[in-house]
Image (cartoon, grey):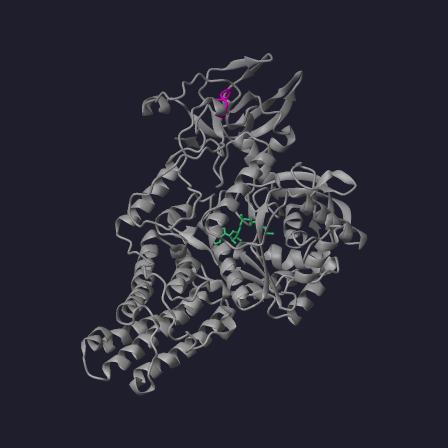
């Protein structure tokens, strides 16, 4: 392959704080389709994916699950990998940011930037958004993040800074000289406007948490997660390694041809990443392609919105080709697109079961019946203008398909291919080969041979073009065409008239069984069961740990990728799962609560919960777990003593809004009267508290019910 042109494509590396869902699958399927096609075009292709495992968000999710960050990351990263394997995604490497090769590479990158004078030490005081892992301009304690609206945290840190401000002019110059660097155009314009508005230096280390890659020579600091994460595209090829073989790989494949990303991470990829690379004097990727979002129930599919659909549900019912076809055909690449089970089944039935499925089964079964399963010889004298029209359309389709695909317009490319499918199906109906076969005149046999030759050629061309998108079904059709392994096909040479005449067909079988209506219900039911079945205990009082409560079964994720049976009865297997959801408890006192018992609404209404704001917070002398707080609950200021000192610095709590159980009998802790209880999640074995809060601004004293 050394003489072949190379092609290197990457997905974003996915965070391990959320399990894989259809949104992640979308990006991975797009990249897999591109990679498969590039291989068929003779390019020496390298396809990288992986998981992003460091940062405070993951550290907290792990604490919530009651395990170490590494254990947590191992589990979720394993789920991503298992899904890609199940879907037969053709990735060449899977990088984890906890891999030693990556950690070494990131440190090498940091040192290189430092040695080149782009990193200096400074200090920062302000608001930090844990979700976005970003310092933000927000008004003050608890103020919402301007990016995502979640409450920010106040931090005072001494950090390493990257001289991003110095990269403003070089970046703008680079964008101007490389018009194809950021696509689509709208994203490019946004990025240019953002850089033009001015860049401030970027903090590239953190001391507020530990779960990251230590700064070389100053391990109190961990390297900023985005510097860590972005470097994966090079560390996976061996950047920072001493091994000669790795250098060859890096030389061979870097710079990347395509970084495929979702539109929400454009700034990191199109501003920070090229800035780091320019500063490090390393080559920049050729292109960064941002796609839109997959929407479900009208908003972006994401764990935090709670509207995810798991890919497994579709794999268990309709199979991977149906899913891949839908994602590429239905969503106009670059724009947001909606997912629905109805639309999925409709597309599947219309385009695959009906259009392509019919073309394939009737063409092949007629060749089997009338020509003993051998591709017939067409006859020039039996040819009509209808055959010429199909040939011309097929040649045009090849050209259009390639042109659209090169522009990432997958839906248009497929539309072009299916125009050919529809035309051939119409041609078959109009030319009635079954009627010609009944005739006994001398012209009928050559005409029948010509009709079926025209049909089979068109089928072969569509099958070849569609292979990167629906690899399983097309590989089967290819075998049925008697052409062997479709992977051997050189797509660059695809043209009309190449099927060897007399080719013996393989066993003819239906490829796309029709899906009946019950499949939609079944998929909906599977998703409902999945979201209803707790992966971990949901409610426990403080003092009770997650492991005290019996777990119910999690939904089935069979690991095999066998061909789907399309009906409503998919079998399920049990899959043990470590808890990913924290328990919720009360911090301050230990209420008696029997797990499993139900209370009436009247019981619940007896509890008065209010929004309070912490005015004063200080440690209680001689008690390392306790904080004494004065909390404004709208009608009065209460003294509350709570066991949260291990998780919260008192000074960071002042101003924070919390939930208070306001009608508890007072009790004394270390001689101090506690008048109420603060609501918090209780995480892991140690019952680490995390205070309950609100995304929206809520007035002090507001009642919860
Ligand atoms: N870890 C960072 C990326 C670091 S890359 C150096 C991250 N991870 S993520 O888990 O949040 O994944 C984000 C990516 O997943 C998106 O950019 C997109 O590729 C894909 N998607 C996740 N949800 C999606 C949709 N609902 N729709 C489309 N793509 C989605 O950001």
Image: 302 above or below 637:
below
Residue range of the region highlighted in magenta in the rendering: 541-546
Q: Position of residue 401 (x, y in %)?
A: 45, 72
The N terminus lies in which quarter of the figure? bottom right
In this rendered view, identify the residue nearer to me: 239 or 538.
Answer: 239
* Type of secondary structure dominating the magenta stretch: loop
| Quadrant of the image occupied by residue 337 | bottom left
Q: Position of residue 578 (x, y in %)?
A: 50, 32
Residue in view at x 55 percent, y 57 percent: 261
Q: Is residue 406 magenta?
A: no
Q: Is residue 443 left or right of residue 403?
A: left
Q: Is residue 50 left or right of residue 204?
A: left
Tell me if I can see residue 523 in this picture: yes
Tell me if I can see residue 141 in this picture: no
Q: Position of residue 173 (x, y in %)?
A: 69, 68
Q: Is residue 544 magenta?
A: yes
The C terminus lies in which quarter of the figure? top left
Image: 555 above or below 624:
below
Q: Position of residue 267 (x, y in %)?
A: 60, 56
| Quadrant of the image occupied by residue 626 | top right
In this rendered view, identify the residue nearer to me: 636 or 676.
Answer: 676
Image: 199 above or below 423:
above
In this rendered view, identify the residue nearer to me: 488 or 294.
Answer: 488
How many labels were placed on the picture?
0
Residue in view at x 64 percent, y 70 percent: 178
């Amino acid at each position: 392959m050394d003489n072949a042109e190379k092609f290197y494509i990457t997905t974003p590396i996915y965070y391990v704080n959320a399990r894989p869902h259809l949104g992640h699958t979308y990006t991975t399927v797009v990249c897999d389709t591109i990679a498969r096609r590039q291989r068929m075009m003779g390019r020496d292709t390298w396809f990288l994916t992986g998981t992003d495992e460091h940062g405070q968000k993951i550290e907290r999710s792990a604490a919530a699950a009651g395990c170490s960050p590494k254990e947590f990351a191992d589990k979720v990263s394993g789920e991503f990998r298992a899904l890609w394997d199940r879907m037969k995604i053709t990735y060449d490497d899977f990088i984890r940011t906890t891999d030693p090769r990556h950690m070494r590479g990131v440190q090498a990158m940091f040192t290189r930037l430092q040695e080149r004078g782009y990193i200096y030490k400074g200090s920062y005081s302000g608001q930090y958004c844990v979700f976005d892992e970003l310092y933000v301009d927000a008004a003050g304690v608890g103020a919402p993040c301007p990016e995502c609206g979640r409450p920010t945290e106040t931090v005072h840190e001494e950090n390493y800074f990257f001289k991003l401000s110095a990269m403003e002019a070089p970046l703008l110059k680079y964008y101007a000289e490389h018009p194809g660097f950021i696509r689509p155009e709208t994203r490019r314009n946004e990025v240019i406007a953002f850089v033009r508005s001015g860049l401030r230096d970027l903090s590239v280390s953190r001391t507020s948490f530990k779960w990251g890659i230590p700064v070389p020579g100053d391990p109190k600091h961990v390297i900023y997660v985005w510097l860590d994460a972005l470097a994966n595209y090079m560390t996976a090829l061996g950047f920072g390694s001493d091994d000669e073989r790795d250098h060859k790989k890096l030389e061979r494949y870097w710079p990347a041809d395509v970084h495929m990303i979702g539109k929400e991470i454009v700034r990191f990829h199109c501003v920070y990443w090229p800035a780091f690379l320019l500063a490090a004097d390393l080559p920049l990727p050729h292109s960064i392609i941002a796609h839109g979002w997959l929407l479900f129930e009208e908003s972006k599919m994401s764990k935090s919105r709670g509207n995810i659909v798991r890919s497994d549900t579709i794999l268990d019912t309709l199979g991977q080709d149906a899913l891949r076809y839908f994602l590429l055909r239905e969503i106009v690449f670059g724009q947001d697109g909606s997912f629905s089970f109805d639309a999925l089944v409709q597309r599947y039935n219309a385009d695959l079961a009906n259009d392509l499925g019919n073309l394939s089964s009737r063409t092949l079964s007629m060749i089997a019946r009338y020509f003993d399963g051998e591709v017939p010889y067409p006859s020039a004298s039996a040819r009509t203008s209808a055959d010429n029209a199909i040939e011309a359309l097929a040649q045009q389709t090849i050209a259009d398909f390639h042109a659209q695909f090169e522009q990432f317009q997958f839906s248009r490319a497929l539309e072009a291919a299916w125009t050919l499918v529809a035309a051939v199906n119409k041609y078959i109906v109009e030319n009635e080969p079954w009627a010609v076969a009944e005739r006994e005149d001398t012209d009928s046999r050559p005409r029948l041979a010509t009709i079926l030759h025209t049909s089979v050629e068109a089928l072969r061309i569509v099958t070849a073009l569609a292979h990167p998108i629906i690899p399983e079904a097309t590989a089967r059709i290819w075998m049925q065409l008697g052409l062997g392994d479709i992977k051997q096909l050189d797509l660059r040479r695809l043209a009309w008239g190449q099927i060897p005449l007399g080719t013996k067909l393989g066993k003819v079988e239906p490829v796309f069984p029709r899906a009946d209506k019950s499949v939609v219900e079944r998929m909906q039911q599977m998703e409902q069961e999945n979201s209803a079945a707790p992966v971990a205990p949901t409610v426990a009082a403080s003092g009770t740990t997650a492991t005290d409560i019996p777990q119910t079964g999690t939904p089935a994720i069979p690991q095999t990728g066998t061909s789907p049976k399309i009906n409503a009865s998919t079998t399920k297997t049990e899959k043990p799962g470590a808890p990913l959801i924290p328990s919720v408890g009360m911090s301050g006192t230990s209420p008696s609560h029997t797990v499993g018992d139900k209370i009436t609404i009247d019981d619940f209404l007896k509890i008065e919960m209010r929004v309070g704001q912490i005015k004063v917070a200080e440690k209680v002398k001689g008690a390392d777990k306790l904080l004494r707080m004065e909390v404004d609950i709208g009608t009065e200021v209460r003294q509350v003593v709570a066991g949260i000192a291990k998780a919260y610095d008192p000074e960071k709590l002042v101003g924070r809004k919390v939930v208070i159980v306001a009608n508890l009998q007072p009790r004394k802790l270390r001689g101090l009267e506690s008048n109420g209880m603060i609501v918090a999640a209780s995480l892991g074995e140690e019952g680490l508290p995390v205070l309950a809060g609100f995304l929206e601004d809520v007035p002090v004293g507001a009642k919860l019910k």
